Image: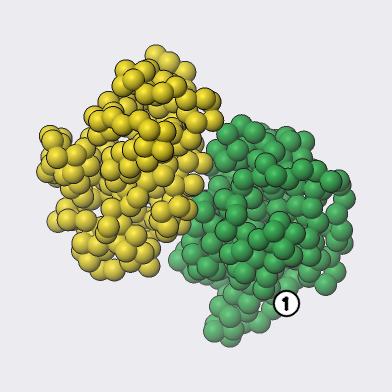
Chain colours: A green, B yellow
Amino acid sequence: MTDLSDVKALVFDVFGTVVDWRNSVIFELSDFFAARGFEADWPDFVDRWKACYRPGMDEIVRGERPWRSVHDIYREALTGLLADFGAPPLDENEAEFVTDAWYRLDPWPDAVGGLTRLRTRFALSTLSNADFAGMVAMSKRAGLPWDCVLTADVVQTYKPDPKVYQMAIRLLGGEEPAKVMLVAAHNYDLAEAQSHGMRTAFIPRTNEYGPAQTTDLAPIGDWDLIAEDLEDLAQRLGC
Amino acid sequence: MTDLSDVKALVFDVFGTVVDWRNSVIFELSDFFAARGFEADWPDFVDRWKACYRPGMDEIVRGERPWRSVHDIYREALTGLLADFGAPPLDENEAEFVTDAWYRLDPWPDAVGGLTRLRTRFALSTLSNADFAGMVAMSKRAGLPWDCVLTADVVQTYKPDPKVYQMAIRLLGGEEPAKVMLVAAHNYDLAEAQSHGMRTAFIPRTNEYGPAQTTDLAPIGDWDLIAEDLEDLAQRLGC
């Protein structure tokens, strides 16, 4: 087993790993449109909306498009999706409010308790593809007890661009990657972190994408720790 | 009076504005060397040590030297200062521990209470020349309730380099400077923030540099708010 005694900071993927974006956004959309007398298959809508996210970021990581925020990626996709589903048209303020549903997200039940325990021994940071201000607002709303927030837009790219991991290693590890552990529910993210010498912890979130989820059901890689959830991670790290 | 209703985030200078670095570092040095049977004029020592800080940063802002962390600036100055004062020599671990005194700092008496109130209405961030990991460690130790941490080393320069203020405007204001207010005890810092369109609040800390302080005793500029301390700032901002 890897020696984890050098780890000083834990950095967390957030969407999926810490917060349940799918059920939260489904709830937000149902609620918003029910008040306007419109119903739809919101789980299907959210799955399609989320599907715009990775391709939108990948264009940027590959340098094919200039930087856009995650908010702008979702905002751009929203209008067409609403039309596809036959939803009533939204004015600009409404469309912004609906897009901001991606920051009105509830934590998984173990998240706040687990983070609170982990924070007693480690510096806790996000390491998320979300927008910085959005992550701050979401964390405040959800009561996530970070010591600091790092997001990919600080370096204007997205995970798995090496710049994101290098930022965490520089700012939280003093250029020593073994001082920083990434906690994530996604194997691709851990693989990139490990390739830079960071420590890695996998947390399965087998319902992140709903009951039909096919990816990241199990660890695919030689991760330093595998924990059931964030309370279990705290236990394994002696917190 | 400037309309402050757009302000969403408050960013704070920390050393001097939020924490009492001078008395804290004097205490740390007295304590460390008393245990080794050595006494000195520690206020004088700390004043000389602090005097290395601004010139060390200015060389970097002017591009005359490559990037160095604040820790490295202080660490480099320490050995010569100790020799000047006739202190017993330190090994590497001891010298690191003593340099880290710059992160074992106590808040001013109004700081934690004031920040806690302000946090109910605003996103709170540091905007400090300190090192990121050091700021995180110091804030944890002192119980400073930031929502996030921003430091000049994120963009590898120092205030008053415009890059530092632009980072805060981009990440916390969505490129709208009037959404971000700098709170500081130093007029030079507020002047630079204002020149970028940020809102400004001055907090006098007339004992920051000890009883003989001659600078920043009063506001020198058309700042949007002047408050006695952080509790008073919370009051003035309706928190």
Q: Point out the residue furthest to the top here.
A: B64
- Front residue of B58/A211: it is B58
Say whether residue A54 is visible. yes
Q: Quadrant of the C terminus of chain B?
A: bottom left
Q: Is residue A90 left or right of residue B127?
A: right
Residue A29 sits in quarter? bottom right
Residue B126 position, x and y percent, is: 39, 47
Q: Residue at x 33, y 38 (%)?
A: B30
Q: Residue at x 80, y 43 (%)?
A: A2
Q: Residue at x 69, y 38 (%)?
A: A178
Q: Callout 1: residue from which chain?
A: A
Total marks in image = 1
Mark 1: amino acid: Asp
Residue B163 sits in quarter? top left
Residue A103 position, x and y percent, is: 56, 63
Identify whether B225 is placed above or below B167: below
Q: Which residue is mark 1?
A: A41
